[in-house]
Image (spheres, grey):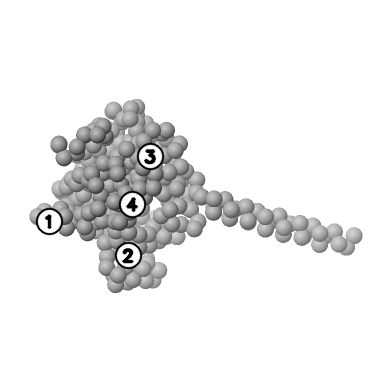
Amino acid sequence: MARRPRILLFGLILAAALATALLAARHLGGPRASAHYAFGHGPTIVLVHGLGSRSGHWLPVARRLARHHHVELVDLPGHGDSGMPVPFSLDRAELALDRALAEISREPVILVGHSLGGLVAAAEAIDHPGRVKGLVLVETALRPQVDPAQRAAMLTALDGDYASVLRSAYQSFGRDSAQGLELYEEVRRLDSTMVKPWIRLALTVDLSREAEGLKMPVLAVLADRSWGAGEPWPAVAEALGYARIPGLRPVRMQGCGHFVMLDKPDDLAGEIEWFADRQDGMNLALR
């Protein structure tokens, strides 16, 4: 009789160990599909927000697009109703998006990504071109926008002075200081253990070479903060990692900050709609 409690205890420990192993296996098996929300009817356009943003930021653009298109708003991993893959990587963020696209449509879609959402969208289009008939990158850099010394300093500061790194980045994203502060306050409320891996990704991932594999038409929409007046496009394309992309059409939006969908929703919707409606083999340069 004295052994029974020990046997029971051993059984509980074994059950706990099995549960832990199953949980780990589930994570290693890949993340769930990203959460997505739909409205409108017609050809499908998928909108992916950026880090510290939310799908609701796309609503002003989505409402216009939904007049003639089926629009899907997708949450990045760690945002909204989408879980954060553990461990986190660009590959696992891409897999969550790929699974969402598989649920959304059997046909290729117009995939639109903002900022880091555009980086994930570009990775998806590179690796799964059959899912994407046209790619729109809004204020997206395909390579880090800092040199190695700056990157090392920012990675160190990310752990030692997280709030300052966040404040500096998001206040610079605003069209003015008021919007910059509002954007910072929004991202500051998010879990830092989710935000930090995304920032590390932005500082380290370079898709500029792989971007040569983007065979579908690509539209790059940039604010004048990224493509300044008088800056030659070849230099901008090289700096942002776009130089190798065939079939690329760049568009410069003046008078707005990093969040183009908030500052110029009608103009941005018009560009996306024009692009979406012409994915029938026409030469984009003919516009």
Kindly report which numbered mark, 2 or 4, lies closer to the viewer in this rendering: 4
In which quarter of the view is residue 36 placed? top left
Q: Which residue is mark 3?
A: 130
Badge 2 marks a residue whose secondary structure is helix
Q: Amino acid at mark 2?
A: Val
Q: Amino acid at mark 4?
A: Leu
In the image, residue 157 sits, relative to residue 214, either above or below, namely below
Tell me the residue at 32%/49% (across/down): 213
C-alpha span from label 2 to label 4? 20 Å
Q: Which residue is mark 1?
A: 231
Kindly report which numbered mark, 4 or 3, lies closer to the viewer in this rendering: 3
* Mark 3 residue crowding within 10 angstroms, few (<14) / some (14–19) / many (20+): some
- Left or right: where 12 falls relative to 252: right
C-alpha span from label 3 to label 2? 38 Å
* Mark 2 residue crowding within 10 angstroms, few (<14) / some (14–19) / many (20+): some
Question: Is the residue under label 3 in contact with that under label 4 (CB below 8 Å)?
Answer: no
Quadrant of the drawing holding the N terminus: bottom right
Q: Is residue 247 visible?
A: yes
Where residue 98 sits in the image (x, y, percent)? 43, 44
* Mark 1 residue crowding within 10 angstroms, few (<14) / some (14–19) / many (20+): few
Q: Which residue is mark 4?
A: 119
Q: Amino acid at mark 1?
A: Glu
